[in-house]
Image (cartoon, helix red, strand yellow):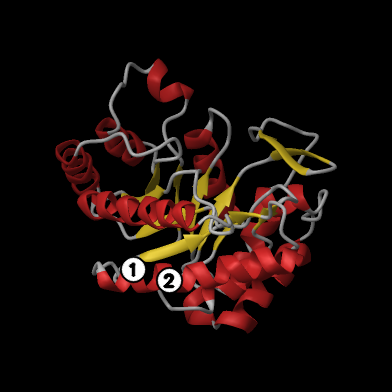
């Protein structure tokens, strides 16, 4: 079943007097949301006991939880020591995800740096093969590891690159950030066909069964000549993308992803809006 939820806690969560992540479970349930993404973006600063408390709250509320691994990950860094740190960031995120009772780890693959694009992508791919081995060695193969499409031109993570990374092993599942794609391509996502063509490409390369429940990040994003600048809210009228064309494309292709709102401060409200839009779309009319 398709799921909608926020990345982290927005302004209204704290304005309502909430302070702790475990409270977000019931908060999401009360808003009619189905999932939640916990960010380790700045690093993993959580005890195992606290993780178990959070996991119990989300299990009781029936809200599925995923995690975003630290932003420091860069599998195209020429340093082997840096690569080892990146492996550890993903594996430690997995350990805490297991304590949460979740199944999905999202991560940023790499930055191009001083390499040519081709060399950076090859090194990233080679390192993801090593990561795959670590995943199996540590018994995490029952989880999904989701390399994310990126919004800046200097980052590794075009749609095509992410699809190729996911061909390495079944543990990899695409995390498609449509705001990032739109920002990187200067506002390319406008029509149902714009979204549908990307989704059909994924299906043709990875197969319907793997793509059916893929991971989605969605928000409007300001962009410039180098791609992404900053995340916005659904109130913004200058930058896209809009969600309705994606909702139509998902229904037409019978895809049911896990959709996380990354709006700036209104992520829960905008997740609600996406769920409403999806429910109101009629592809038979």
**Residue 253 placement: quadrant:** bottom right
How far across and down, in percent of the image, does residue 203 sit? 60, 79
Residue 168 lies left or right of residue 48; in this view the side is: right
Tag 2–tag 1 contact (CB < 8 Å): yes
* Quadrant showing the C terminus: bottom right
Residue beneath the point at 16% across and 39% down: 53
The residue depicted at 71 percent of the width and 54 percent of the height is 181
267 lies above or below 102: above
The image's mark for residue 167 is none
Where's residue 202, x and y in %? 62, 75
Q: Can residue 162 be seen in this view?
A: yes
Q: In this view, does 140 lie to the left or right of 250?
A: left
The residue singled out by tag 2 in the image is: 130
Mark 2 element type: helix
Percent x, y of residue 145: 42, 63
Q: Which residue is labeled 1 in the image? A: 134
Nearest the viewer among 236 and 278 is 236
Q: Tell me the residue at 55%/57% (across/down).
A: 109
Q: Which residue is drawn at 64% across and 59% down?
A: 157
């Amino acid at each position: 079943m398709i799921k909608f939820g926020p990345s982290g806690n927005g302004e209204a969560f704290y304005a309502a007097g909430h302070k702790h992540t475990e409270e977000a479970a019931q908060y999401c349930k009360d808003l009619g949301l189905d999932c939640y993404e916990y960010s380790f973006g700045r690093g993993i600063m959580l005890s195992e006991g606290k993780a178990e408390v959070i996991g119990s709250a989300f299990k009781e509320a029936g809200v599925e939880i995923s995690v975003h691994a630290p932003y420091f990950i860069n599998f195209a860094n020429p340093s082997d020591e840096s690569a080892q740190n990146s492996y550890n960031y993903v594996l430690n995120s997995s350990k805490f995800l297991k304590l949460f009772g979740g199944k999905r780890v999202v991560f940023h693959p790499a930055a191009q740096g001083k390499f040519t694009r081709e060399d950076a992508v090859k090194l990233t791919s080679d390192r993801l093969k090593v990561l795959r081995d670590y995943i199996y060695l540590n018994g995490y193969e029952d989880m999904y590891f989701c390399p994310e499409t990126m919004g800046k031109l200097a980052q590794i993570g075009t749609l095509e690159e992410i699809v190729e990374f996911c061909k390495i092993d079944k543990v990899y599942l695409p995390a498609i950030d449509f705001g990032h794609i739109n920002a990187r391509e200067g506002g390319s996502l406008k029509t149902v066909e714009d979204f549908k063509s990307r989704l059909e490409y994924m299906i043709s390369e990875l197969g319907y069964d793997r793509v059916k429940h893929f991971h989605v990040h969605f928000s409007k994003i300001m962009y410039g000549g180098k791609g992404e600048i900053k995340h916005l809210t659904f109130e913004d009228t200058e930058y896209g993308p809009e969600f309705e064309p994606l909702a139509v494309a998902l229904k037409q292709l019978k895809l049911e992803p896990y959709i996380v709102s990354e709006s700036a401060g209104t992520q829960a409200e905008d997740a609600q809006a996406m769920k409403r839009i999806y429910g109101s779309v009629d592809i038979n009319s």
